[in-house]
Image (cartoon, rainbow, N blue to C red):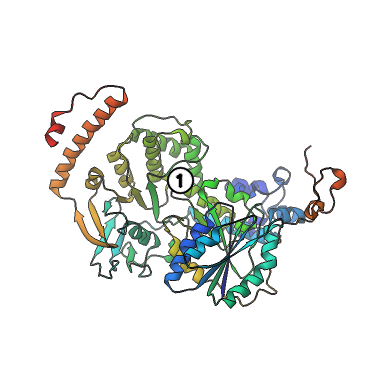
Amino acid sequence: MQLITVAGPPSAGKTSVMLKIIETLQEETLKVGVIKFDCLSTQDQILYQKKGIEAKIGLSGNLCPDHFFVSNVQDCLTWSQKNNLDMLITESAGLCNRCSPHIRDVMAVCVIDNLSGVNTPRKVGPMLKLADIVIITKGDIVSQAEREVFAFRVKQANPSAIIVHVNGITGQGAREVGQLFKGAQGVDSLTDYHLRFSMPAATCSYCLGQTRIGQNFQMGNVRKMDLS
Amino acid sequence: MWDHLSVMTVKQLFTSYPYATDFFSSLPNLQQSEESSVAAYFAAIEEDTLQDLGIGRQELLDQFLSFMLQMEKLKEDKVKIESITIIGGRDKQGKVEDIELTIHAGEIVCIVGPTGSGKSRLLADIEWVAQHDTPTNRKILINGQLPDMRCRFSVEHKLVAQLSQNMNFIMDLSVEEFVSMHAESRMLENIEEVTSHIIAKANELAGEQFNPDTPVTSLSGGQSRALMIADTAYLSSSPIVLIDEIENAGIDRQNALRLLIDKQKIVLMATHDPILALMGDKRIVIKNGGISKVIETSEKERENLILLTQIDRKMLAIREVLRSGGRINEIPVELEEII
């Protein structure tokens, strides 16, 4: 069983790119499944299922999507073993730029798009900085110069990653990434595996459903801005 | 490398390696720590700060070293690419593609064929430096030899630069800021000089002039294309330039292509415009996912190119009349003859 964690900001093109990559793997008769993590709702499983890809969704609702991910990822692995998949891809949106769903010894991919601007690679945390592969999308609509500067900034943020350009519409570059995916290390169980980096902490009164605003209602892990 | 860097003060580091400031830009308290050593700086970052940054201390150190190594590598001279060779594979029906085509630096080769015929696949094969490991089973050689396969995934050795009609500038910068940002990412030393040279060249190619302080997003289509081509000619690290049509508006296409080949680029151009196609030295005809033939531009075609260019100029002149609010009552006699 191969497992690959894919993360990236919303609308970066994760699903489009994964569809193109998986298509090339299906041509090689690999059975690939996807579990899509999202917050409120998603219809993306239909896109996957249309292509004959086993897909499930996990909605985190009012929980931090990353925490939700890590509490469920072992069950996802078990599900894909039951379904005799060769490869499971988990797809999750990094909403706070501090997200870090990547797991040590499990291939980690970050999808990021050219339209997000050249300063974005510096702003994104472990999701990008600790990924093994960075996929850059939407290169077909910006200039060559912007593509080069963007890739350079990604390289600065994560010098050891493999950086690839994939076009989510035409599929240019997808086959090549598929070959990289095939090299992912196998996993039988994630028990005792470690996250590459701790997840953002959030244990304050508001996590427990508090809705009132004011000093008296702030409890637990609370931090104040320095506005001086 | 760490032995050497760790004992420098942060200030010395920035003087010797100006690009290092990029690494520190997202890290805390630079002003106060400029006099402390690099090692002391990293040791002093608080655990909470590291948590917020989303990285461990050792990982941060490793990233710093790997950043410095990578940036130094960018300065190294690369192997000059003098030619690429396409060795045929098979088309969609499995028919053998009997071809071995070598394209040299400074050559323009056009690619023609209907949508879906396999133009993109050919370009992808070149970009991937296919070694019988793509659906077409083609093989690509660089300088007549098997290339260093690391170029497949390296940002600095990317083989192909792309330029198409759909591309736009999206950055909120002036032309000058934009070009110098690109120059900085190439670790050049004479950034100002290169920048003003590129802007001047782009203005030579563009029909209407623009200033260094014009925002890139407000350039016209022709001006954008002119700037993209001049920038690619001088600043792109990629030896192969792939062009998907250049619309015949607001840009001197002949000189734009000449600029690219003067800079010893290999130009591959997907086009159905007869003028562009005949500007090429050869054209590859694609059918059914395979190269069906390679046509060399003949003497007769070159003569016809002159004629076509004249017709084109007339068309442009008529357009200009329309643009300035005039009537199109007169059609040049030569054009009428063709009709």
Q: Amino acid at mark 1?
A: Val
Residue B37: image x %, image y %?
A: 70, 52
**Left or right of residue A105, residue A64 in this image:** right
Side (left or right) of A177 relative to B221: right
Q: On the picture, is B186 further left or further right than B295?
A: right
Location of mark 1 (residue): A142
Q: Residue at x 48, y 30 (%)?
A: B213
Quadrant including the N terminus of chain A: bottom right
Name the spot of residue B300 as percent of width and height, x first. Answer: 12, 46
Q: Is residue B17 visible?
A: no
Tally of numbered tags: 1
Query: For residue B89, what is the image quadrant?
Result: bottom left
Say which of B282 and B289 sits in front.
B289
Q: Is residue B179 left or right of residue A119?
A: left
Quadrant of the image occupied by residue B308: top left
Q: Position of residue B10 (x, y in %)?
A: 67, 48
Front residue of A206 and A122? A206
